[in-house]
Amino acid sequence: MKILKKVNKGLVLTIIVIVALVIYLVGVEKQREADKDDIIKACEEFIDFTDKYSVIPEDVLKLGEVFSQDKLNEYIQKMKNELPEYMIENDEAVGIEAQILQTNIENAYSTESTIEPENTDEEQAGQSNENIINSIKTKMEREITKISSYEYDGNQVTVTFNSTTTLTTNYLNNGETQENQSSFNGYEEQIILQKIDSKWKVVYSDLQNDDYINLVI
């Protein structure tokens, strides 16, 4: 009889533990489902930010004008000042994203010299060499087309998704401004976020860019 009571007591405790675990897991799953809208919103806001700072507006650099390193540096600094709003408070994480975006900005334009390379030394001697801007990426729009998964690890989540990006490039062709639009698809892109004070902040992102696209301009 005593053995039966011990067995019954152990069984009851086991059932209580299982029920408590099930309730906890159900609660966690419900919270994760409730968080998905905020997670997607945080991803989209960060993508909008990276779109903005992967191109260069005309008030920074303008086609046909002399390239200004000072204006470009100011634009890069503006990006660095705004970036922490979207990210966790971690200097290394912010620094990685800042470097990625700075590279995108620096790759968003091209210049040509006012001195023709085939000119002789005598012909070049009387000319001042200036770098004229001949193409600028002016607009970028990345749209999430499919979310593949949400992978949770404590208070962090890794969102894996596909996207379509439309890129607008303005360029000079025989002195006239022309526009080129291209699009590319991103596959298995990722944004890692962490929940801090009920807000989702970016830890790291892996977004595909147009580096592999050869724009004929």
Image (cartoon, rainbow, N blue to C red):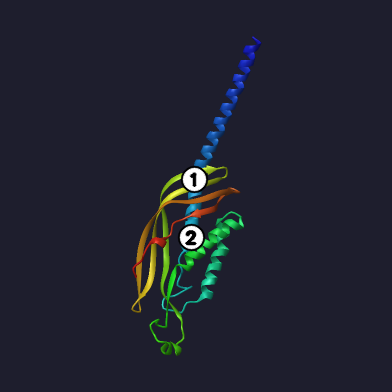
Screen quadrant of the C terminus? bottom left
Screen quadrant of the N terminus? top right
Q: Residue furthest top?
A: 1
Judge from the rendering whether residue 93 lies leftward or rightward of residue 187; answer left or right.
right
Q: Read off the residue under disc 1.
A: 36
Where's residue 176, x and y in %?
34, 77
Q: Residue at 62% of width from left, 12% of height from top?
A: 4
Q: Residues within 10 Å of mark 1 (few under 14, many from 20)?
A: few
Q: Residue at 61% of width from left, 22% of height from top?
A: 13
State which quadrant residue 215 falls in. bottom left
Q: Read off the residue under disc 2.
A: 50
Q: Residue furthest front?
A: 121
Q: Amino acid at mark 1?
A: Lys
Q: Residue at 52% of width from left, 50% of height from top?
A: 192
Tell me whether the residue at label 2 lies in contact with that at label 1, contact meaning CB atoms closer than 8 angstroms: no
Compared with residue 81, is residue 68 higher up or lower down, i.e. above or below? below
Where's residue 66, x and y in %?
46, 79
Q: Amino acid at mark 2?
A: Thr
State which quadrant residue 109 falls in. bottom left
Compared with residue 20, is residue 45 higher up or lower down, i.e. above or below? below
